[in-house]
Amino acid sequence: MNTTCGATKPPDNFRLKIHSGSCNEVDTISNICNCPLLAQTDTHKYLGIIIDQNLNWAPHITFLSKRVRKLIYLFKNLRESADLKLMIRIYYALCQSLLTYCIPVWGGAGSTHLLDLERAQRAVIKVMLKKPRLYPTDKLYKESGLLSVRQLFIFNSVLRHHKTIDPSSLVSQNRRQPRPRVPSYNLQLTRSQTYYSGPFLYRYFNDNLRIFPMCRTSLKTALNQSLKTLTYDSTEQLLKPVI
């Protein structure tokens, strides 16, 4: 384990056992029973998500980047026989489905951790559109009509919060414009988690688009159109209070 865990790291002699019903209280306290011992690990894969000890999601993002890059060869072959409309549909099914799986959980990771995944996504899109390796990022997303990894994080975080928001949690500045509450946290690690980023992003778009009364279909359309107007840098700027 590295030192970034700080005081939250368990001591080296920490032991945790799974005690059975046959253990008596004395054996449990003195730790002399033969119950199985849980091993310490830096990462653990749960429901397809790699959870690491620092919660910076770097191992999961690295794993995901490799899976996305494997699609490059597939799209190189597809572009010779399929039109762009069909390839976009296949991109949604094979690539974007990977990128959006549980993205509200890990998508608030630092920009340095996400860089390789963003490059992998752009490599796939460049192959689809037959663009050179150094094609400008903003032009690439504009021509393809696709959202970047960060924008997918924003999109899915807002949708997720919209589904669970309680009307009583809205703070009314006046009767016409209710505002969702945003929890207050001091630690940067906590601010990057979905229980802060979701309400924060929801409030931002509610202030600008008044999304609270929208149905899910209307919200998806409005969010998609709004996010496509943002450049790569302006998207990062929007997330600055989160990441």
Image (cartoon, helix red, strand yellow):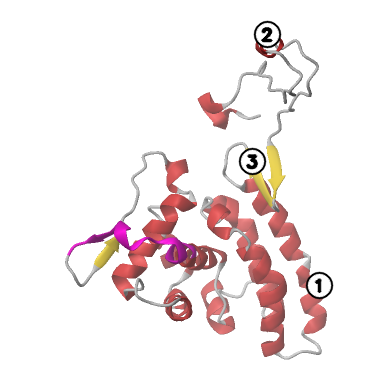
**Residue on which the image places disc 1:** 73
Q: Looking at the image, is 188 positioned above or below residue 90? A: above
Between tags 3 and 1, which lies in front?
Answer: 3
Q: Which residue is pictured at 49% across the width and 63% down the height?
A: 160
Q: In which quarter of the image is residue 197?
A: bottom left
**Residue on which the image places disc 3:** 52
**Residue on which the image places disc 2:** 26
Q: Which residue is pictured at 63% across the width and 47% down the height?
A: 58
In this picture, residue 103 sits left or right of residue 221: right
Q: Which residue is pictured at 20% across the width and 72% down the height?
A: 176
In this picture, residue 212 sits left or right of residue 114: left
Q: Where's the N terminus, which quadrant?
A: top right
Q: Do the residues labelled 2 and 3 touch (CB within 8 Å)?
A: no
Q: Earlier in the sequence, mark 3 or mark 1?
A: 3
Q: How crowded is mark 3: few (under 14 residues within 10 Å), some or many (20 or more)?
A: some
Q: What stretch is highlighted in magenta?
A: 160-173
Distance from label 2 to label 1 (Cα)?
A: 61 Å
Between tags 2 and 3, which lies in front?
Answer: 2
Residue 208: x and y in percent read 31, 72
Q: Earlier in the sequence, mark 2 or mark 3?
A: 2
Name the amino acid, label 3.
Asp
In this picture, residue 92 sits left or right of residue 209: right
Indicate the secondary structure of the residue bearing disc 3: strand
Name the amino acid, label 2.
Val
